[in-house]
Amino acid sequence: MTARLNRLICRFDPSQLDTSVSFPAPIGDSVEIELPGLSLRAAGPDVRIGATQRQMLVQIGRPALRNAALAADYAKAGPGALLAPLLNDASAFADELQGRFALLWIDLDRAQLGCLNDRFSTHPLCWATEGSALALASRADWVPLADRQIDPQGIFDYLYFHVIPAPRTIFRGVSRLEPGHLLDCGRSGVRNDQWWQPRFTQTPVGDVRALKARFVGAIRGAVERESANAGRVAAFLSGGTDSSTVIGMLREVSGSQPRGYSIGFDTAGYDEMEYARIAAKAYGVDHREYYITAQDLVSHIPAVAASYDQPFGNSSALPAYCLGLMAKADGYDKLLAGDGGDELFGGNARYAKQKVFELYQAIPAAVRSTLIEPIAGADWATRVPLLSKACSYVEQARMLPLARTEQYNLLQRLGQDSVLGQAFRSLADTDAPLQLRRRVWDGVRADTVLDHELGFDWRFTLADNDLPKVIGTTSLAGLDVGFPLLSEELIAIALTLPDAMKLKGFKLRWFFKEALRGFLPDEILTKKKHGFGLPFGHWALTDPALRALSRDSVQGLAERGILQAAFVDALFSKLLPTHPGYYGEMVWIGMMLEQWLRANAPDTRF
C-alpha cells in the first residue's frame, strides 16, 4: 500500500538568496529548485505550483474562494492567480480561503518567503531556524536541519496529552505552525502571526426555522463540495449523529447509493454496529462492515505508529486505518468523515457536566461559605458514603473549568514521580503542558464558559488529535479525506449560536439535532455518543500476541529511561488486570511511543 503523501521541503536563507534568477512559469504540480539561498522540493497528489518570473506559490490542498471574481480567475489560471492578492496582504487574503489548504510563497524581489495553514492545520507545516536560514517542511521529520535531535520535552508532552500539540514537535527546535497562523521570513528575520482566531458571540436567533434551513443547506453544500471532482467517494459510518448526517447528505447530493464503512468490536460495551445498520437502512447505504480483532492490531500497530512524523497515541487510529484499507481495496479515492459536529455544536458530555457544576454557583454565597463548604472540607464527611459524593461535587464545583479537567489527566493521576524515569523527568518542564492549555484557554475569544470549552476543543480535540488521526490513517491507506462538518458556513453558525441552543438544559447539541429531526432516524438522535474506541485493555489481557507486543514495547521505554521499570511491572501485573479499560490507555500510549522510536529514533536514551 502506497501512502498518499504531499511532500514539501524547503530551506530559505534571505542573506544568501540569489535574486537575479527567474522562476519558470507555469510549472505544474511539482517543483525542484536548488539555488544559492533557496532549496525547494514539492510534489504530491494535492500539490499545485503557480509562478511568475519573480514569484512562486506552492499550494497544498484544494482551497475554495469566497470572492467570486477571484474564484473565476483561479479556475482559469490556477494557483498563479492567487499570487498578487497574497503578496499584497496575506492575512486578509487567507480569510478569503475555505477548506483544507497550506500555502508557501517566495518573492525574489523582496527576498521573502511566507507560508500559512488553514483554520485547523489539516495540512501541517513544520519549521525551524538555523542561523539566518528558515528550514520548513510538511512533516516534522522532513524539516531540513543539519542536526535533528529528539526533544525530551516533546516526549513528556506526548505522555501528558497522548499527542504532541502544536507548536512543539518531537524534535528539538522544530515547531509546528499552529492553526490559522502565518509565517514570514525575510532579511529582518522570522515573524509568526495568527491570521485567524474564532470569535464567539451570543447572537439572538430571530427566526429559528430559517436558521435550521441555512444549517441543513450548509451541510448539503459542504458534502457536495467535498465529493465533487474527487473520484469515487465513500464515507465512514459509525452510527453516530455526525457520520449518519454526512452519509445521508451524500445520498442526497449524489443521487445514488452511497458506500459506507463501519467498524465493529466483538466485545460487550464497545460495539454499536446496530446504529450503523439503522443509518445504512435509512439512507439505502451500500454498507460494508469490518469487525476488528486483536490480530489486526498486532499486524498494523508497527506500521501505523511509524507512519506519523512524531508519536501519536489516539487508539481509534487503528480502526480508521482498517476501514481505509477496505475502501482503498474497493477502489475508492476519498472518504468523508463526520468529525467536528460535537465540538462546533456542543455534543460532548463534559459540556453538560460543567453545567451541573455551575448549579452550585446559584446557591447563595453566604450559604456556601458558612454551611456547605465547612462540612465538605471536613475529614469526617469524606468518610460518610453519601456525604463523600457531595464533598467531591463541591470540591469540583469550586474549581475553574480548566483546572477541573487537569485533575483527570492520566499522567497526573498516576503520579509523575512514580511513572517517569528520574533522569528523563529532570530534562522536561513538567509545567509546560499546563501552561499551553492555559494559553489556549485564555486565548479563546468568548463570553461564556461553554464557548470557551468549544474553542479550547477546536484546538486540542480537533486540530491536534482527531483530525490528524483521520488524515494520517487515510493517507497511509492511500486515500484522501474530507470533513464537511468543518465548513466555514457551519463554523460561522457555531460562532454565533447562543449557548441555550447548543446545550438546552442538559440536552447536548440541541440545535443540531432539532434541525435534522426527520432527516436522521430517531434511534440515532437519541443514542449516546460512542465512536471508534478500542477495547484494547481487555484484548491486551486475553490475546497472547497482543500482550507480548504491548509488554515488550512498554518495557522498551523503561530500558530507554523514560518510564520506571517498577511502574511497568505494576502496570501489567496489577493495574491493567484491575481496570483494563482505564489502564489500557497508558499501555497503548506507551506502546505507540516505543514503536515510533524503534522505527524513527532507535538510539534514544535518557
Image (tube, helix red, strand yellow):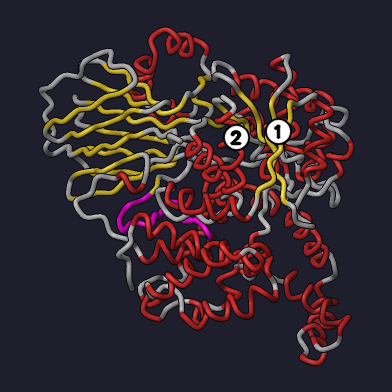
Residue at 79%, 23% in the rendered image: 213
Residue at 68%, 58% in the rendered image: 535
Q: Are marks 1 and 2 in contact (CB under 8 Å)?
A: yes
Amino acid type at circle 2 is: Met
SS at circle 2: helix
Is 174 magenta? The answer is yes
Real-space Cα distance between discs 1 and 2?
A: 9 Å
- The furthest residue to the front: 544
* Residue 523, numbered circle: none
Name the residue beneath numbered marker 1.
288
Whole-percent x, y for residue 570 in the image: 57, 81
Q: Please indicate, yes or no, whether residue 247 appears anywhere in the rendered image.
A: yes
Whole-percent x, y for residue 298 in the image: 54, 55
Name the residue beneath numbered marker 2.
326
Residue at 60%, 43% in the rendered image: 320
Q: Residues within 10 Å of mark 2 (few under 14, many from 20)?
A: some
Is 283 magenta? The answer is no
Amino acid type at circle 1 is: Arg
Find the magenta span and give its range.
Answer: 162-175
Magenta span dominant secondary structure: loop
How many marks the image carries: the answer is 2
550 and 172: which one is in front? 550
Q: Please indicate, yes or no, whether residue 434 appears anywhere in the rendered image.
A: no
357 and 472: which one is in front? 472
Whole-percent x, y for residue 296 in the image: 59, 50
Residue at 42%, 51% in the rendered image: 306
Rendered position, 429 above or below 452 = below
Of label 1 and label 2, which has the lower sequence position? Answer: 1
